[in-house]
Image: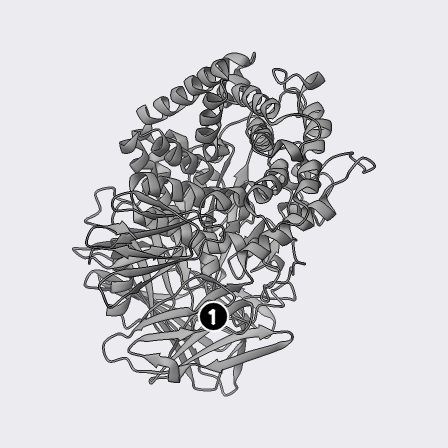
Amino acid sequence: MKSDFLEILQNEHGAITKFQLNSDPSNMNWVIDPDYLDELGYQDLDKLFGEFTITINGKKYFSINEKPNLIGNETESTATFTINDLKLIQKFTLVDESLKWNFTVRNDSSEDITINNLGLWISLAYVMFRDKNVERNANQSVAVFPHISDNYMKLAAIRRDNTNPNLGVYQTKGKVLSVGTFNEYTNRFFENVSPSLDGMLFHEIILAGGYDDDRRPHHDWIYSQEKLTVQSGETKEWSFFLKPFTDKKNFYEVAMNYGHPRFAFEPMISQGQDQIFTIRTADGQELKRAVVRYKSGNDLIEQDLTDQLKGGRLIYQPESLGEHQVILKFADGTRDMGVFNVMSSTNQLLRNRADYISNHSYAGKDGKVPYSFGPVSNQGESIGKMTFLLQACLLDGKISDPAGKIAQVEESAVKYVRPKWFVDGDFKQPRKLYGDFYRVMDLEYIAHMFYLLSQCPASTLNLNSPKVYLSWAAQVFDVRVNPDLHEDERGKTEAQMLGTYFLYIEDLLADLKKNGLVKEYAEIFKSWKSVTDRMAASSDTLQAAMTEHFFDNAGFGPAASALALTKNVKAARTYGELLKANIGFSNDFRSQSPDRWWEALSYMIHSLWGGVTAAAAQITGEQLADPELVEAAYRATGAILYMYDSNATATNRMLAPGEAASTYSIAGPNLNRPDLSRNRFGQSIFASDGGIFTRLFPNGYTGEDDWDMGEELVAYLNGFGQTTYIYADKDAVLTAVNGRVKKLSNGRYEIESFAPYLSKYIYLDTQESFETNQKKVIFNPANKRFD
């Protein structure tokens, strides 16, 4: 099929193999290409765009195994399948600057037929190419962010370099239950190649069921898994339009043109706060009811909020904790919905976490691994619990027994960390914990821990003074970033790579200078400048986006923020665009996480790298005065904190207060592991899958799901934990991030902060900072100053 706007190629099944916009100078193929699958040996032709699976009376059918009747011309094509007395008709039509996709199920038999499961593959180009040309992964691949509801499902396929055009998918007919994914990948980590990970996600629109057996979410009360009954002589029909858009704002404008309402709310609020919904209806659309649903114990509660709706605005104060679903019901019988989270105070969540680590994770003198914080790992990420514990004690005056908690970390640092990671405790000799090499990245977590110990009051330290720990931090950090301190090529190379240390290096340098550690300051500053200068010089090729993964937010997130902190503005903006494309927007707060798939084999929340990416976006946005980045960072934060939320009700993995789990699979179903769909877990749960996971997790699944968590909470505490932002949008409307704006009668604004440990407000337009711990302040737009 071909028009002036669009070119579509299909295979003998009618599946789309090429989707190209004629006005796109990059000639991107917006769907997964079977030629690329063949090149890499991936056997996934059954998942090309337009193929489907259907289960009838317990028997599963794949469209690729059927022979359809195909008819078509340059502007439309129709494929008709006959399966078990059902006619399944798929029709693609070029309509103006879009592709219309119709799928119809017709029951021509004399009996009702029940469909247990029905999924349509919509395999957009979500590909991490096995290609060291990073620009290919940035420009020819998309992140896909779902907005799921019965009648107004939409997908935003965002090009990873954030250039135009992007591609939207908009539902206009029928009922959709969910969107699932299947992950195809190759990980050659143990083959001594770098990068070692490539792969792709195939997306599937779920029209019925979603799961063929009991491996499914058992506590997910939000998304339906209902079967579909097609009565004798009945026809069921679904329609979708695929149309380009430019940015987030335009994505929703196009949706409204297709009859979708615009529905906005805070992704996360604390108990006692009001939730404010704004609702705009499309032309000719009439809202009849608004209801909220939430779980209280074993009961599913529904409240009618319709009477509270005033002029497209609804204010609601939740009565319960956990996930809340808001459903909009329209006069034509259609429904839209959104999901937000209500948390007990963030302060309490963090205090519970600190108590849990202290009481349950610390081994002490007589533990299996004395003085360690479990679960034990050779990787430095496992020290994140210790850095969090220190940062929490330094910030929160209501943490129970802070001196005792600091003492635990200090004892572990001196008696476990130092002798484990360094030969005879010599910071210049990292121990080879990985056979014949050491991992330089581990050292940034250790340096951070020592640095935070140096910030503790001397009265709380039992083994060394703060200045000793500052010196230790400097020595370890110097080894982390100085290639001259390593003998082998691997160490020299890794020392010049960025990592999470962008979160604290500026503070470390300032304290080294303040305390007269001139030599250490000079060496570290030289290495820091060398790394960022080199990264700035190569920013046009996006090399920092490639790590062990061919394209990785653990690469471009730190790059953006490091460049922003060192005033490499042009290069920081380049990597900042990758951050904007990486952080989702959705009607479900959990789907607003930074895009990543390896640790769940599906689109997911990953606590550590999601949190670090959110922090990178916040720091970059603040330094560049870019509200879009700060907004994205805040959207992601609500998803990250869900990994610590003991009041969640819609996941199989429930958490006790203070417990945590590192990963959440957003897709439903996660077709690689349906039992993990919309569930929280740790990556070692994949040990039973065999293959590379057996080697990665030789001890199997331990049930300890938080081994790498903590550093992201330190990032939160030093970011949105203390800061609220305001800015004037393009229409000169004052907007708050991590807070709320209220216009007063005298033309000024009251700004309310949501930060649990508030220390400042920042007006992004001028980058003015107003330091205070007052939860409400006044802003004067006339002189652009806080009063």
Side of 630 where 114 appears, left or right = right
Side of 427 where 107 appears, left or right = left
Residue at 60% from the left image edge and 32% from the top image edge: 453
Residue at 41% from the left image edge and 60% from the top image edge: 146
**Taking the image as drawn, is residue 351 in sight?**
yes
The total of numbered circles placed on residues is: 1
- Rendering coords of residue 505 (x, y %): 46, 29
SS category of the residue bearing label 1:
loop
Residue at 37% from the left image edge and 75% from the top image edge: 314
**Taking the image as drawn, is residue 701 in sight?**
no
Side of 614 where 224 appears, left or right = right
Q: Quadrant of the N terminus?
A: bottom left
Measured along the vertical axis of the image, is residue 683 above or below residue 295?
Answer: above
- Residue 300 vs residue 180, the one in the foreground: 300
- Rendering coords of residue 9 (x, y %): 30, 53
User: Are there few (<14), some (14-19), or many (20+) residues within 10 Å of tag 1?
Assistant: many
The quarter of the picture where residue 265 lies is: bottom left
Q: Which residue is mark 1?
A: 177
- Type of amino acid under label 1: Leu
- Residue 554 vs residue 736, the one in the foreground: 736
Measured along the vertical axis of the image, is residue 340 above or below residue 564?
Answer: below
The quarter of the picture where residue 336 lies is: bottom left
Outermost residue, left direction? 4
- Rendering coords of residue 337 (x, y %): 42, 72
Outermost residue, right direction? 366
- Rendering coords of residue 193 (x, y %): 53, 27
- Residue 633 vs residue 79, the one in the foreground: 633
The quarter of the picture where residue 218 lies is: bottom right
